[in-house]
Image (cartoon, rainbow, N blue to C red):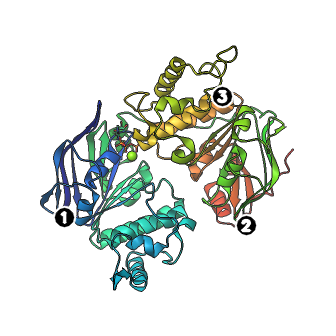
């Protein structure tokens, strides 16, 4: 057996009433990739934060290369050879790649940053690990995948031998995932030790050597990946079997509820979305596929009203809402689950109950409809509604008063989905609705979207996951370079066709005119 790079022994951590980690033992062998799996709230991020010195355990021991360590903070962990790639990148947008990589550990010449040495260092590390990057590029302009490579380079620059990645693929497209995995394999081949948190079983089977499964803060399974089956992993995670939901076709869709015509969105002189037209009918789910950065997000933002349309129109239930603000559009029957749950989706410092009520607080049952109390909020109604949604959507939390920022990533996502779906708005736009949620929760959100359609809702579903689109959508549109380049009805929406159109080889049917 290979030697242990890291041993966590009996790690426990409690947040008030919640036991996030309960006597966890974890051994990371040198030169291997170790996956950590578990449902939302199982304690994965807490364990990784403890390993990186961000959170102090209540008890337990961290042993790095045979030496017991007590980290007072991340700097101690870095000094011991650990590096962490954060999901919410901690980079400076206005600085270049090289500046970000060396920040805090700069090569200096006569006291100032040695730019040439920094660029050379970035090049050396890029080549050694196969990390494609441009050291002069400004980080703010980079895609999620490219930013992540900068985070990895940052850790490698500090000589990290043990890399911690918490849900690194959640924000990546399939191609970016492939190149990340190539980098991780290379790093393990060079003797590094990698620990990766992910919800995706196919990723675990593809990338890891060993797997540890957590449930309710405890280890419920340890596997050598070569001997692990998908069923065994699911069983260890959930204690039950999970069956994927199927999209049993519905009847004829009804009238057009959401209509986008000739929409162009321009950002700093660049057309992000160009002449986009689409229509979603009641009782229909229309999927939008595309590699991130091809205009899908801008279309969603323009529908919601957080980004201005340079030209074109948006209609909800026949009303032109193009000149209305976000509130006005919501009042006309729009609900939106945005991609960025921390920025647009939630207010992290506010309680879960308040977050669940955002946008509901002017209408009954939470807000009084009329009379002298019109516009007032009933705190009891807010609390009752929050408790109901928390139970319905299985949000794992110690209570509705906990700030959303203290929820685990997947549970925060469930809060946004619960709030928006509970509006029962005629038009629902969802962007990456299952990002960061565990497989059981994915199935439950999928079922709810299908129910929404069955009840006559018009759903626009934007997703990087082709399988998700195939499972739910009646039609799939593909965006490339800001345009809709292909449209496939459900029966023709094969992975090959969608994948080819996403890559710009659009052989699909020309877009139908909007009725
Ligand atoms: N700062 C905090 N204050 C209060 N509770 C917390 C805090 N951090 C984590 N918790 C709780 O600890 C539990 C474990 O959370 P953790 O973030 O480790 O889960 P996770 O396995 O990473 O889940 P996910 O897959 O959703 O990211 C959750 O119940 C969470 O609400
Ligand atoms: Mg987490």
The label nearer to you, 1 versus 2, is 2
Q: Residue at x 67, y 50 (%)?
A: 288
The residue indicated by pointer 2 is 269
Mark 1 / mark 2, whichever is N-terminal: 1
Q: Residue at x 66, y 28 (%)?
A: 424
Q: CA distance from mark 1 to mark 3?
A: 55 Å
The label nearer to you, 3 versus 2, is 2
Q: Nearer the viewer, residue 14 or 172?
A: 14
Q: CA distance from mark 1 to mark 2?
A: 55 Å
Q: Is residue 420 above or below residue 131?
A: above
Q: Is residue 226 left or right of residue 459?
A: left
Mark 3 / mark 2, whichever is N-terminal: 2
The residue indicated by pointer 3 is 424
The residue indicated by pointer 1 is 2
Q: Residue at x 37, y 39 (%)?
A: 41
Query: Which residue is at the far top?
Result: 371
Does the residue at mark 3 contact the one at mark 2 (Cβ under 8 Å)?
Answer: no
Q: CA distance from mark 3 to mark 2?
A: 37 Å
Under circle 2, the secondary element is loop
Q: Tell me the quadrant of the picture where the C terminus can be found.
A: top right
Under circle 1, the secondary element is loop
Q: Residue 38 location in percent, x, y? A: 36, 43
Q: Residue 36 location in percent, x, y? A: 33, 50
Q: Residue 105 location in percent, x, y? A: 33, 72
Q: Residue 348 location in percent, x, y? A: 47, 41
Ligand 1 within 8 Å of disc 1? The answer is no
10 Å crowding of disc 2: few (<14), some (14-19), many (20+) = few
Ligand 1 within 8 Å of disc 3? The answer is no
Q: Residue at x 61, y 21 (%)?
A: 376
Number of numbered discs on residues: 3
Q: Which mark is residue 129?
A: none
Under circle 3, the secondary element is loop
């Amino acid at each position: 057996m290979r030697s242990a790079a890291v041993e966590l022994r009996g790690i426990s951590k409690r947040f008030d009433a919640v036991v996030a980690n309960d006597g966890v033992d974890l051994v990371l062998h040198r030169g291997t990739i170790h996956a950590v799996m578990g449902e939302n709230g199982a304690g994965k991020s807490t364990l990784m934060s403890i390993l990186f010195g961000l959170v102090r355990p209540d008890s337990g021991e961290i042993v790095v290369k045979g030496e017991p360590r007590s980290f007072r903070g991340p700097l101690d962990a870095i000094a011991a050879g650990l590096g962490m790639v954060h999901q919410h990148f901690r980079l400076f947008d206005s600085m270049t790649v090289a500046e970000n990589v060396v920040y805090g550990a700069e090569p200096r010449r006569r006291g100032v940053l040695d730019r040439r040495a920094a660029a050379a260092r970035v090049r050396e590390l890029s080549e050694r690990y196969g990390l494609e990057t441009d050291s002069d590029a400004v980080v703010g302009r980079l895609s999620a995948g490219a930013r992540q490579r900068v985070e990895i380079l940052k850790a490698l620059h500090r000589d990290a031998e043990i890399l911690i990645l918490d849900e690194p693929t959640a924000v990546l497209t399939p191609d970016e995932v492939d190149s990340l995995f190539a980098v991780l394999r290379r790093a393990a081949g060079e003797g590094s030790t990698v620990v990766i948190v992910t919800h995706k079983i196919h990723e675990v089977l593809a990338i890891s050597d060993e797997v540890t499964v957590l449930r309710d803060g405890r280890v419920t399974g340890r596997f050598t990946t070569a001997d692990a089956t998908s069923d065994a992993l699911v069983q260890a995670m959930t204690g039950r079997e999970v069956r994927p939901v199927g999209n049993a076709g519905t009847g004829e869709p009804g009238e057009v509820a959401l209509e986008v015509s000739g929409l162009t969105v321009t950002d700093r002189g660049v057309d992000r979305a160009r002449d986009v037209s689409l229509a979603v009918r009641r009782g229909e789910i229309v999927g939008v596929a595309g590699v991130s950065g091809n205009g899908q997000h801008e279309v969603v933002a323009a529908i919601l009203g957080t980004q201005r349309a340079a030209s074109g129109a948006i209609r909800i239930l026949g009303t032109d809402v193009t000149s209305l603000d976000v509130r006005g559009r919501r009042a006309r029957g729009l609900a939106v689950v945005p991609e960025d749950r921390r920025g647009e989706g939630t207010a992290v410092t506010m309680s879960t109950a308040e977050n669940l009520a955002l946008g509901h607080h002017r209408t009954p049952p939470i807000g009084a409809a009329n009379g002298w109390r019109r516009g007032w909020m009933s705190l009891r109604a807010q609390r009752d509604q929050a408790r109901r949604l928390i139970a319905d959507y299985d949000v794992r939390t110690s209570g509705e008063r906990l700030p959303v920022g203290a929820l685990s990533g997947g549970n925060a996502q469930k809060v946004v989905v619960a709030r928006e779906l509970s509006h029962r708005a005629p038009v629902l736009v969802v962007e990456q609705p299952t990002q960061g949620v565990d497989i059981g929760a994915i199935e439950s959100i999928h079922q709810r979207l299908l129910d929404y359609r069955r009840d006559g809702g018009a759903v626009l579903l934007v997703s990087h996951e082709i399988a998700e689109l195939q499972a739910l959508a009646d039609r799939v549109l593909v965006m490339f370079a800001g345009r809709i380049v292909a449209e496939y009805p459900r029966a023709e929406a094969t992975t090959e066709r969608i994948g080819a159109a996403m890559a710009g080889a659009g052989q699909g049917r020309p877009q139908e005119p909007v009725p």
